[in-house]
Image (cartoon, grey):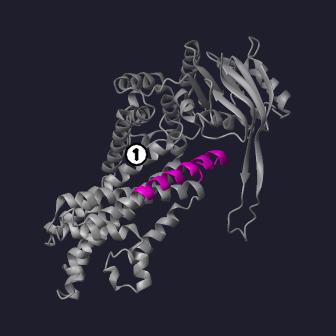
Amino acid sequence: MISTLDKLYAILWRDLLTAIRHRSGFVVTLAGVLIELAAFYYLSRAIGPGFRPSGVEYFPFLMVGTGVYTFFVMSAQAFLSSVQEAQQTGTLEVLMTTSTAPSELVMLSSISAFGGNLVNLLVYFFAGVAVFRAAVHANFLSCAAVLILSLAIALAIGIAAATLQVAFQKGSALLWLLGSGLWFLSGTMFPIQSLPRPLELLARAVPLTYAIDGMRRALLEGQSMVAMAPTLAVLAGFGVVLLPLALAGLSLSLRRARQNGTLSFY
Amino acid sequence: MERVVFESVRKIFRHRPALFNWLGRERGGETVALKDVSFSAAGAEVLVLLGPNGSGKTTALKLISTMLLPDAGSVRVGGFDARRDAGEVRRQVGIAVAAERSFFPRLSARENLEFFASLDEVPRRERAPRIQEVLRDTGLEEQADTLVMKFSSGMYQRLGIARALVKRPVVLLLDEPTRSLDAATTAHFWATIRALARQKTTVLLATHNFAEAAAVGDRLLLLDRGELLVDRPVGDGDNPEALRAFYFRMTGEKGEKLVIGDL
């Protein structure tokens, strides 16, 4: 356990140093956050105060939807990029010869990638409230529960993308599918009840739908964990199923790559 | 006791053309990288792998490091099978690969070594002194806190050796370790290898450099097109010229000396 925490610290420290040494990176990210929020703010003003999806104002509805969606997709993207970069430089092969088991290494690396984007998500929400006056009635305990359970699902998605990258050098394809499909189906911009019945049923099979819905209810409506128990249970169920599946897939693809000599192919 | 054992190891790389290759000329096929190769290496022994490009030297090192898995036969390190007990094998093996840029460019040399040392489970309190020691041994003390993105090829190569040494492996694998090093650093490196062997480390070194083979080797493996042609000790009479003549005789390659006047 101590050894695992020590490795996690090493990976977090590596990623933090790399991030802060990209001097313009933080400023660009912050500017991007403000521009995106401004676009959604004026979009909601253009639509007018009469549109209140799920009973809340449209701007906070958009803020939570796009924030959680971006957290999922950008985290998976960041993790996938680190795997692709490691393949291109030859670092991946060397990492696979250290005393750390490959699956442990990937898991810890993905936690770091998602941790960085969690900070971005918090900055996004903070800027939405502080700069654009989004009305929130947060239940912080429920928010934390939704975030933690969503993280397990997000990790599974990132690891699945890495698995496809190692196996077929096509991790980006999964993210492209996520980027376009989930944007439409997960209730990011509008309630899924607006979709035709078959698509609504499909949307209910998407884990991100529950993460976004849960975060809206926890952050905007202040619902307690008891009131949100069914949503939290669904999120936990997705995590329990998807995370071990993604790890097993990754383990298989790494073994196949070592057998075929394609570990550093990209 | 034998520390590294290769037993009838076969490794084949299969090439499949891309899925959509209607217009291309890419064809499927396979390359036999190692054909039923067997050898072993004891503790305190420096085994030199010589052979032309594509002879299987790097493949052999990658199989020992568990980067690759064999198609047939077995690879054992310290009694552990590289396929079944890969984790135990990785704990014993350190590898300096030929790929130069296998580091994190926005970390310094010291930060890179700290990162890899933690993944190699080097105890926290031992890390700083060990890193200082390998930085000194590889002549990188002055560049220890420079971001590696500013390094030259030779400095990358030294850092790769430092990374392999910092875990104090019982089996050290080196793939063309002195390819980009200057003469003084190379001489110091050879002395380091001999010192490691005296401390019971098993060293497997793939090289094209006959002077290196003569200077550090205890035993010589000559590979050609995946086959082990020769496995013999390096004797007192094995100076670089003698090794060079022996190599060309065994591989059938033409190795005429380049005379400047011929250019």
**Quarter of the image that includes the N terminus of chain A:** top left
> Which residue corresponds to mark 1?
A108
Mark 1 secondary-structure assignment: helix
Q: Is residue B146 left or right of residue B47?
A: left
Q: Is residue A164 left or right of residue A114?
A: right
Q: Main secondary structure of the magenta part?
A: helix
Q: Position of residue B30 (x, y in %)?
A: 77, 50
Circle 1: residue type = Leu
Q: Position of residue A12 (x, y in %)?
A: 34, 44
Would you say residue A32 is visible in this rendering?
no
Would you say residue B20 is visible in this rendering?
yes
* Region rendered in magenta: A240-265
From the viewer's side, name the closer residue of B130 and A99: A99
Q: Position of residue A18 (x, y in %)?
A: 36, 47
Quarter occupied by residue B84:
top right
Residue occupying image coordinates x 72% and y 58%: B16
Q: Is residue B247 left or right of residue A63?
A: right
Residue occupying image coordinates x 47% and y 22%: B137
Q: Residues within 10 Å of mark 1 (few under 14, many from 20)?
A: some
**Quarter of the image that includes the C terminus of chain A:** bottom right
Q: Is residue A231 left or right of residue B179?
A: left
Chain containing the residue with disc 1: A
From the viewer's side, name the closer residue of B50 and A192: A192
- Asked whether A249 falls inside the magenta stretch, the response is yes
Q: Is residue B160 above or below residue A73?
A: above
Q: Is residue A187 above or below residue A163?
A: below
Quarter occupied by residue A243:
bottom left
Q: Position of residue B143 (x, y in %)?
A: 40, 32
From the viewer's side, name the closer residue of A165 and A138: A138
